Every structure is written in C-alpha cells, then in structure tokens.
Amino acid sequence: MVFRHSDRPLHATILVLPEASVMSLAATLDPMRAANRVTGAEPYRWQVVSPDGRPVATSCGLSVQVDGPFRPDQDCDLLVVVAAFNAARHATPAILSALRQGARRTKLLGGVEAGSWVLAMAGLLDQRRATTHWEDLEDFAARFPQLRAIPDRWVIDGPVFTTGGAAPTLDFMLALIRARQGFDVALNVASLYVYEEVRLPSDAQPLVSLGRAGRTQGRVALAIRIMEKHLDSPLPVARIAAQVKCSTRTLEGLFRDTVQTAPGAYYRSLRLQAARRLVTDTDLGMAEIAVRTGFASIASLSRAFRRRFGQPPSAARRDSKA
C-alpha cells in the first residue's frame, strides 16, 4: 500500500538507536524533506524518536535531537529503525517489545544498516528475505537462521524492508518517492544530491566501492571482486590474472596505474582491513579471524597486523573497547 502512487501524506516514524550512523539517518530522512521541497507540498511528514526521548549520540559523536520517545501505540505509515554499532546492546528487551507492538500499527516496517539486526532480534524478519551491511552479513545469517540473508543492497519482503547502509538506503527512499510521486519527482530529488541512481536493489553490496575505476578499468574491478570472494583462501596473482584474461605483468601494470600498488600488496591490504574490522567490531577469537582472512595461524596474522597497523590485534581490540 505504501509503494504506490498517492497524494495522501505519508507519516513516518524514524527510531534512532545510540551509535547509529549519521549518514544512514540522513539517507532515510532527507529525501523526504527534499521531496517536500521539490513538490512544494507536504507528501511526507515525519518524527524522529529515540528509545527514551533524549538526544541520541551517533557513531561519530554528534548528538541528534529527537521529537520525543518512541510511542509504539501510535499509528504510522512507515516505521524505520536506524542502528549501527552495538545494536544488540542497544536493542533492549523493552525496545524489542515496543517494536513488536509498533509493527502491528504500521504499513511498512524497515531496518536500516544494523536496524536489520534489531528487527531480527524482535522476531520480525522470521521466514523473510533480508539484508544488512556487508561487513556483518555472514554473522547475520549465522545468528538468524530463521531468515534468508541475501547480499542485496536493499530488500522488500511483504510489509518489511531492510537496507545495507547509507547509499542503499538513499536508493530505497528514491524508489519509494518514485512509486508515490512519480519518476520526475524522484529524479529531481536525486539531482539535489548530485546523485546518479545507477544500482539495482538486487545488486550485491561490494566490499570495495570502486566508483569511476569500476567503469574505466574493468579488469582491475573484476580482479578486486575475485579477491573479495577469496579472502579466506587467497589465490595466486597469476591465477587472478588468468581469470580476468590478461598476463600477470599486464595486471600488475593496471593495478599500478589505477590503485598505485601491486595486486599482491592490494590483496594483502584487503585481507588485513577485513581482519581489522573483525578484531575491532566483533568478539570472534583470533584463530577464527585468521581463518576468515586467509592467514595460516594467529602468529602470521599478528605479524602482518602489527606491520600494517603498528600494534598487534589484541591491542587493537583493547583500544576499541576503551
């Protein structure tokens, strides 16, 4: 009912949890503001709420003012949960209970970034397709086997949608505006951000956003995608070159011209960045992190990690929790 042409104002409630991303919040909220500006009317009305009605400290430390506490007994057309870091800690039993109640009083329920985790914890994604930010997708699928986790940018399954992060959320909001107000309004809203909507919702979320290089250096882009798929079992550069149909020497030259480093060094950097995310953002053991990022042992991971980041993984984890 929400995704169809309508002249009736859409009423949205955006629940922001602590440590949410400012970009994900902006991608949810500002397209509605822009649609109101473009149309010269008020097709969207919204309220931003927090669990207790107090300002929310986002992941960058910026405090977001809200309109009040989340009231699950209020009807709305669109209820969106925006979350990012430590979502499981911030999604208290009281919040999960309130969301289950609020879900019965909205037409479309959404989870932005780690908001997907919150909806899943509340049992609102059971037996549905859903996505979350690519960094957490594997753990999301393991934690919630009762749903079908897919790597799409955004997903709608019945009355529930989920998105993978800020840019996919902007894509979703533009699709909503296009469905309700028409193509021209959505195009004008995208133009306000100088944004070219070139991705389909079913496009996979990449680990590396290649931007212009993805269009101008197809072999480099393909090589990086192959590397992404084999972080846990690294391929020789010669094999990657064969898969992109060029010689090793040619691939090395393309990498030097495009990303200013050799393909082997870039591959190792990609694995170490993945390891650093797992060290700082999860509680996985170091042996599991080594396996997931293609290091033969904890010792080899620790040596490479220290050379790259100036400290061992244990110290990086300790600092991230401080």
Image (spheres, helix red, strand yellow):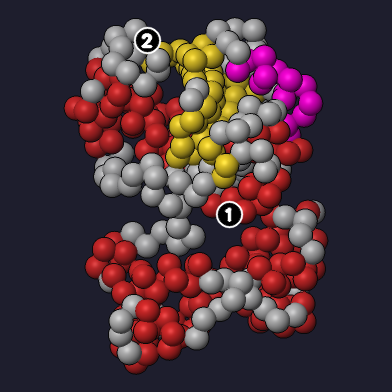
Question: Based on the displayed image, in which of its 4 quarters is residue 41 positioned?
Answer: top left
Per the rendered image, the range of residues in magenta is 90-103
Instruction: Residue at 40% x, 34% y: name it.
Output: 172
**Structural crowding at the residue carrying mark 1, measured as other residues with C-alpha within 10 Å and reported as few (<14), some (14–19) or many (≥20):** some
- Toward the bottom, the furthest residue is 249
Task: Residue 92: say if magenta.
Answer: yes
Q: Position of residue 88 (x, y in %)?
A: 73, 39
Question: Based on the displayed image, in which of its 4 quarters is residue 274 positioned?
Answer: bottom right
Label 2: state its secondary structure. loop
Q: Which residue is mark 2?
A: 9
Residue 252 or 21: which is nearer the viewer? 252
**Structural crowding at the residue carrying mark 2, measured as other residues with C-alpha within 10 Å and reported as few (<14), some (14–19) or many (≥20):** some
Label 1: state its secondary structure. helix
Distance, label 2 to label 1, CA atoms, is 35 Å
Instruction: Residue at 31% x, 66% y: name it.
Output: 213
Q: Which residue is mark 1?
A: 135
Task: Specify whether 128 is left or right of 122.
Answer: left
Instruction: Residue at 40% x, 15% y: name it.
Output: 1
Residue 202 or 270: which is nearer the viewer? 202
Amino acid type, mark 1: Glu
